[in-house]
């Protein structure tokens, strides 16, 4: 059997912080929007984050973005660097602001479900 009913036309890839995953997925689930959590790692900080794969009809994109806005918070992370002017290695934390959510919107050519 194949699902032909109301096929989603847009794929959203939302990179969010790992801590926000449960809240975001819960909120999307409450909206009746399907999401898949792909564990990922940020290239800059090298820390675990999450990529939510969300396939949706275009008219639901605003609701999805609102749900992500509500549940995904900006945070300060720190990377450690060394002060060069001192003889003993001394780590110096540098603050880095990490979003919210980084969302890519991608048109989908096909959507199929096989049962
Ligand atoms: P990360 O690559 O670990 O980046 C974490 C944060 O570090 C970024 O937060 C940004 O504030 C800073 N950052 C990243 N690259 C930088 C660089 N070359 N120079 C200075 N600062 C830099 P966000 O922008 O909120 O990004 C959060 C996560 O979203 C990223 O984790 C990455 O996994 C993803 N991301 C952001 N923009 C992306 C893009 N254009 N393509 C693919 N993934 C992206």
Image (spheres, grey):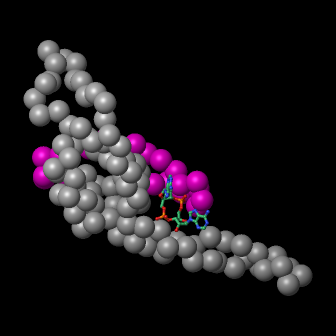
Of 100 and 9, nearer the camera is 9
Residue 23 in sight in this render = no
Which residue lies most toward the left here? Answer: 5
Image quadrant assignment for residue 44 = bottom right
Of 39 and 34, nearer the camera is 34
Which residue lies most toward the top here? Answer: 1
Quarter of the image with the C terminus is top left
Q: Residue at x 47, y 68 (%)?
A: 98
Quarter of the image with the N terminus is top left
Residue 38 in sight in this render = yes
Region of the chain picked out in magenta, as a range: 27-49
Q: Residue at x 24, y 67 (%)?
A: 70
Q: Is residue 78 above or below residue 19?
A: below
Image label count: 0
Q: Residue at x 69, y 79 (%)?
A: 92
Residue 78 place in picture, x, y as percent:
57, 73
Image quadrant assignment for residue 18 = bottom left
The answer to whether 50 appears left or right of 44 in the picture is left
Residue 100 place in picture, x, y as percent:
38, 66
Residue 68 place in picture, x, y as percent:
27, 60
Q: Is residue 70 above or below residue 58?
A: below
Image quadrant assignment for residue 47 = bottom right
Which residue lies most toward the bottom here? Answer: 86
Q: Residue at x 16, y 50 (%)?
A: 59
Of 60 and 14, nearer the camera is 60
Is 20 included in the stretch rendered in magenta? no
Is 35 included in the stretch rendered in magenta? yes
The answer to whether 29 appears left or right of 85 in the picture is left
């Amino acid at each position: 059997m194949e699902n032909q009913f109301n096929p989603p036309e847009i794929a959203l890839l939302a990179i969010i912080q790992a801590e926000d995953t449960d809240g975001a997925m819960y909120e999307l689930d409450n909206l009746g929007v399907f999401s898949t959590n792909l564990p990922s790692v940020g290239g800059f900080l090298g820390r675990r984050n999450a990529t939510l794969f969300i396939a949706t009809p275009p008219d639901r994109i605003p609701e999805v973005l609102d749900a992500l806005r509500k549940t995904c918070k900006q945070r300060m992370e720190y990377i450690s660097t060394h002060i060069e002017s001192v003889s003993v290695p001394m780590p110096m934390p540098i603050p880095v602001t990490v979003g919210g959510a980084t969302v890519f919107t991608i048109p989908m050519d096909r959507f199929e479900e096989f049962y």
